[in-house]
Image: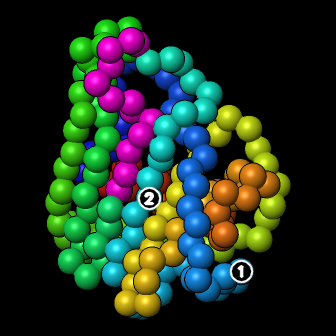
């Protein structure tokens, strides 16, 4: 499984993210309960890039802070789209768009299912600064619901939020899948 980013030269950098917007009008405004249910078909965790971190070199083909994981629950399929850094952070040619799509076995799926089950709705309206800001899209037969990362909940860019901690668990699990 591809991580949210790949650095092959030993470069050290901070992932950065920015707040994304979503309307979600007409959808239920859940404030408690499970995010993923028995009827959930797809879950997408995405980063839009931005935030605090080193600047990309001019001419870089992609941004390692912009990525997404699309998870199909029934088939245990995980698709990743992002950016690999295959060399020095200073070399624009090192930034290469990348993607993977694979179906995982039951043993690999188990920790991911656990992380999905831990996704928690948040009613927090505080704000942090310069940390990962992601969104989470849940698709089921009744429609699509987009949640923001509650780290930036005070900006009220989303009608509903999930906890940063539960998104961290999901992202770490996805990043560490074999």
Q: Position of residue 175 (x, y in %)?
A: 38, 49
| Residue at position x 57%, y 24% in the image | 53
| Residue at position x 37%, y 51% in the image | 68
Give the magenta part as a residue range: 57-69
Q: Position of residue 135 (x, y in %)?
A: 53, 58
Q: Where residue 72 is drawn, which disc sits there?
A: none
Task: Give the total of numbered labels.
Answer: 2
Q: Position of residue 94 (x, y in %)?
A: 26, 17
SS for dot 1: loop
Q: Position of residue 157 (x, y in %)?
A: 67, 57
Residue beneath disc 2: 45
Magenta-colored stretch includes residue 67: yes
Circles 2 and 1 in contact, beta carbons < 8 Å? no
| Residue at position x 44%, y 18% in the image | 56
Give neighbour class at mark 2: few <14, some 14-19, many 20+ (Cα, 10 Å). Answer: many
Image position of 62 (left or right of 118): left
Residue beneath disc 1: 31
Is residue 117 in sight in this rendering?
no
Q: Please tell me in which quadrant of the rendered image residue 25 appears.
A: bottom right
Q: Nearer the viewer, residue 52 or 143?
A: 143
* Mark before the other along the chain sequence, 2 or 1: 1
Magenta-colored stretch includes residue 1: no
Image position of 85 (left or right of 33): left
């Amino acid at each position: 499984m591809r991580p949210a980013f790949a650095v092959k030269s030993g470069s050290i950098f901070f992932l950065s993210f920015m707040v994304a917007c979503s309307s979600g009008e007409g959808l239920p405004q859940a404030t408690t309960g499970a995010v993923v249910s028995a009827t959930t078909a797809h879950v997408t965790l995405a980063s839009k890039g931005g935030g605090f971190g080193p600047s990309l070199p001019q001419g870089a083909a992609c941004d390692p802070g912009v990525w997404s994981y699309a998870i199909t629950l029934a088939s245990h399929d995980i698709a990743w789209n992002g950016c690999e850094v295959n060399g020095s952070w200073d070399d624009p040619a090192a930034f290469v768009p990348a993607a993977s799509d694979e179906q995982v076995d039951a043993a690999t799926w188990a920790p991911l299912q656990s992380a999905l089950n831990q996704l928690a709705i948040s009613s927090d309206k505080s704000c942090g600064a310069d940390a990962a800001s992601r969104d989470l899209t849940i698709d089921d037969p009744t429609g699509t619901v987009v949640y923001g990362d509650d780290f930036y909940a005070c900006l009220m860019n989303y009608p509903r939020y999930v906890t940063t901690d539960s998104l961290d668990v999901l992202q770490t699990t996805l990043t560490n899948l074999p």
